[in-house]
């Protein structure tokens, strides 16, 4: 499982259930960027490792000096921006 695989699955998930700010989101969505990556990571690894794997993938996607959560929750951020960052993940 690579960061890219997780990010692409997370982008697909956001398209299906929606995106949110201010929290990870429930299992059924909508999700923030990290919540979507954690959901996607669970497809590839066990639940205990999913959070760590999700954080690594989200950080790789965002490549910003702030935290992934702060980036996701920035006022004016859009779902389209989040999906574009996930799809561009190396």
Image (cartoon, rainbow, N blue to C red):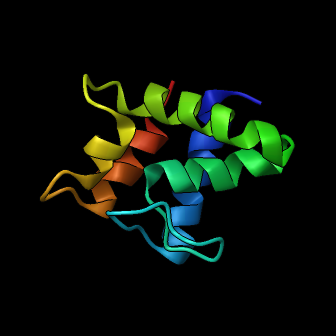
Q: Is residue 56 above or below residue 40?
A: above
Q: Residue 26 lies in what quarter of the image?
A: bottom right
In this view of the protein, which residue sits in the foreground, 80 or 49? 49
Q: Look at the image and tell me in which quarter the N terminus lies.
A: top right
Asked whether, in this view, residue 60 is left or right of residue 38, the answer is left
| In the image, farthest residue toward the left | 76
Asked whether, in this view, residue 78 is left or right of residue 28, the answer is left
In this view of the protein, which residue sits in the foreground, 2 or 75? 75
Q: Residue 4 lies in what quarter of the image?
A: top right
Q: Is residue 78 above or below residue 5?
A: below
Q: Is residue 50 above or below residue 53?
A: below
User: Which residue: 58% across, 45% down?
Assistant: 8
The picture places residue 48, in percent across and down from the top left corner, at 80, 42
User: Which residue: 49% across, 73% down?
Assistant: 30
Asked whether, in this view, residue 82 is left or right of residue 27, the answer is left
Image label count: 0
| In the image, farthest residue toward the right | 46
The picture places residue 40, in percent across and down from the top left corner, at 68, 51
User: Which residue: 13% across, 57% down?
Assistant: 75
The picture places residue 81, in percent across and down from the top left corner, at 28, 51
């Amino acid at each position: 499982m690579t960061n890219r695989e997780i990010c692409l699955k997370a982008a697909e998930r956001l398209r299906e259930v929606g995106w949110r700010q201010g929290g990870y989101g429930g299992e059924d969505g909508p999700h923030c960027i990290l919540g979507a990556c954690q959901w996607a990571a669970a497809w590839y690894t066990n639940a205990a490792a999913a959070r760590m794997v999700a954080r690594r993938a989200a950080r790789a996607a965002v490549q910003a000096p702030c935290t992934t959560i702060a980036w996701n929750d920035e006022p004016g951020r859009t779902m389209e921006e989040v999906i574009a960052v996930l799809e561009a993940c190396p």
